[in-house]
Amino acid sequence: MNAMKRLPRLALCAAIFTALACARAQDLAEISARGKELMAAGKYEEAIPIYRELVKALPGNPGPVMNLGLALHMSRHEQEAATQFQTVIRLAPDHIPAHLFLGVTYFAMKKPELAVRPLQTVLRAEPKNLDARLILAQALFALSRYESAAQQFKKLTELDPQNPKAWNGLGLSYESLATRNFETLEKIGMGSPYWLFLFAETRATVGLYTSSFHLYREAEEKMPGLRGLHKGVAEVYRMIGQPQWAAIEAAKEQSLPPLACGGAVNAAPPGSPQKGAPPPAAAGRLTGKAECEFWAGRYLEAIAATAGRTTVEACFWRVRAYNELARQAFSSLAQIPNSAEVHELLATILFNRKQYPESVTEWQQALKLAPENRYYQERLAIALSSSRDYEKALPLLEGLIQRSPDSVQLNFWLGYTLLSLLETERAVPYLEKAVAIDPSIPAGHKQLASAYIQIGQPEKAVPHLKKALPADDDGSVHYQLSRAYRMVRQPVLASEMLNKFREIEKSPEGGKKGFERLEITAP
C-alpha cells in the first residue's frame, strides 16, 4: 500500500527532473549557439568565457574543450590553447582536428620540434590534408631538416599546384641544401676549381660581375674542361653589355667534347659538336654519373648518385643540382596566376638575392592588389632604400613611422635613408632609437657610429663601432674605428685597428672583395 502511494511521487519527481534537464539542455544549446555566433563574427575573446562555461557544464565532453581551444588559439593565447587541444586528445585520441590544431599552435609558439608529431598523425589519417602538410613542411624547414621539408613541399605542389607557399618553400629548401653542401665544400676544397666556380656563380647572382669574372678565370686555369665555366663568363659579358665577347665564350662552351656516360658518348649540351670531338679524357678526368645526370636535367638522380660521399666533386654536383631544382621551383612560383601573395614571395626572393630594383617592382605589384597592406608598404620602402632610391623611400618611411613609432625596422631604415641623403642630424635620433630598442643589430650600431663621426662626435661613435665589430666581414668597421680612435687621440688603438683592417683585406674573405678593383678583360 505504501509502495502504491510512493508511485505518484516518484512519477512527479521524474517529471520535474526531466523538465529541469530539458531546460538545462536548452540553456546549454543556447549558450553553444551564442559561442558559434561570436566565433563566426571573429569575436574570439568574447567566445572564450562562453566555452569555459560549457566545459564546466559538460565535463569529459571533448566538443566544448575543442571549441575553447580554438577560441584561445584565434585570440593568440597559444599556451592555454595547446593545453586544451592536449585535453581533447586524452579524451579522444583519434580526434584529428585536435592533433592538427595542436601542431598549428606549437608552430605559432615557435616550437616546431613539438609541432612535427601531431601533424604527422594528421597526415597518416588524412594524407591529402593540405593545411597539415604545409605546416609540417614549414616546421621541418625551421628545424633545418631541409631534405624532409623538401619532400613535404614537393608533395604539396603535387596536391595543390596553385599554392604559392608550396613552391616558395620547395625553392627555399633546395637553396638551403645547396648552401649546406657549399659550406661543406668550402671546408674541404676552398681554392679548388669547383669552389671557385660556385663562388663565381654566387657573385654573379648578386651583381658582382668583376669578381665573378676573375673567379671563373682562375677556375679555368685549374680545370679548363669544367663544363659551365665559359657559359658563366659569357653571362658576365652579357650583363656588362659585351654581346660579342659573350658569343666567343659561348662558342668555347659548345666546343667542349661530349660526355661519356654509361660506357657510350652521350649528347653534350645543345650546340656541342657530336662528331670528331676529342674524348672526354681531354678534360683531364673521367665523367662521373652525377655529372651525366646533371647535364641530362635529372637533378634528383644527380644528387642520388653522390649519396654518402663528401668529396669536393660530390659536393659540387649536389650544389649545382639543388640550385637548379630551386630555380625550377621559383620559376613555377612565378607562373602561378596573379595574386598579392605571389608578388610578396617573389619580392622577398629578389630582395634576399640583393636584386633590389626587381624587388621594388614586385612589392609595387603586390600593393596594387592589396593597397592597404602595411607590411607591403614597409617592405617597399626598405627595398627602395636598399636600391638607393632614397628620395622615394623617405616619404614612405616617414608616413609609416608615424603609425609605428617603436618599430626597430622603420627607425633603422629611416635613419639610414636620411644618412644617405646627408641629412645626418635628422638621422641620429632614429638610429639611436633603433639600437636602444634592439641593441643586438650590428648594422644599427655601424650606421649610428658613422653618423656620430660625420657630426663631429667620434667619442660617441667608438662604443657603437666596438659592438659592430663581430659582423665586420670586409674590414670597414675596423677602418672606421681606427679613424674614430685617431679623432679622439688614441693613436695606439688607431694603429691596432688599422693593422687588423689590413689583415682582413689580405684574408680570403677580404681577397674576395678585392676582385672588384680589377677589370673585366676581353676573351
Image (spheres, rainbow, N blue to C red):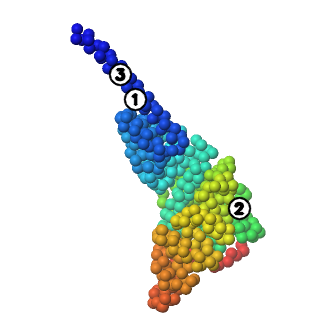
Position of residue 71 measured from the top left corner of the image (x, y, whole percent): 46, 43
Q: Amino acid at mark 3?
A: Ile
Residues at marks 2 and 1, CA–CA distance in whole angstroms:
84 Å
239 left or right of 183 in image = right
Label 2 crowd bin: few (<14), some (14–19), many (20+), radius 10 Å:
some
- Mark 1 surroundings: few (<14), some (14-19) or many (≥20) residues within 10 A: few
- Tell me residue 186's x, y (percent): 51, 67
Nearer-N-terminus badge (1/3):
3
Q: Indicate the position of residue 288 as horizontal and vertical percent values.
A: 57, 57
Q: Residue furthest right?
A: 244
Q: Quadrant of the N terminus?
A: top left
Q: Which mark is residue 74?
A: none
In the rendered image, which quarter is residue 389 located in? bottom right
Give the amino acid at mark 2: Gln
- Residue 197 falls left or right of residue 16: right
Task: Name the residue tied to disc 2.
Answer: 254
Q: Nearer the viewer, mark 3 or mark 2?
A: 3
Image location of residue 351, percent across then percent down: 61, 63
First-in-chain label (3 vs 2): 3
- Residue occupied by mark 3: 16
Give the residue at x 37% y 40%. 87
Spatial separation of the CA atoms under disc 1 and disc 3: 12 Å
Give the amino acid type for the residue marked by disc 1 in the picture: Arg
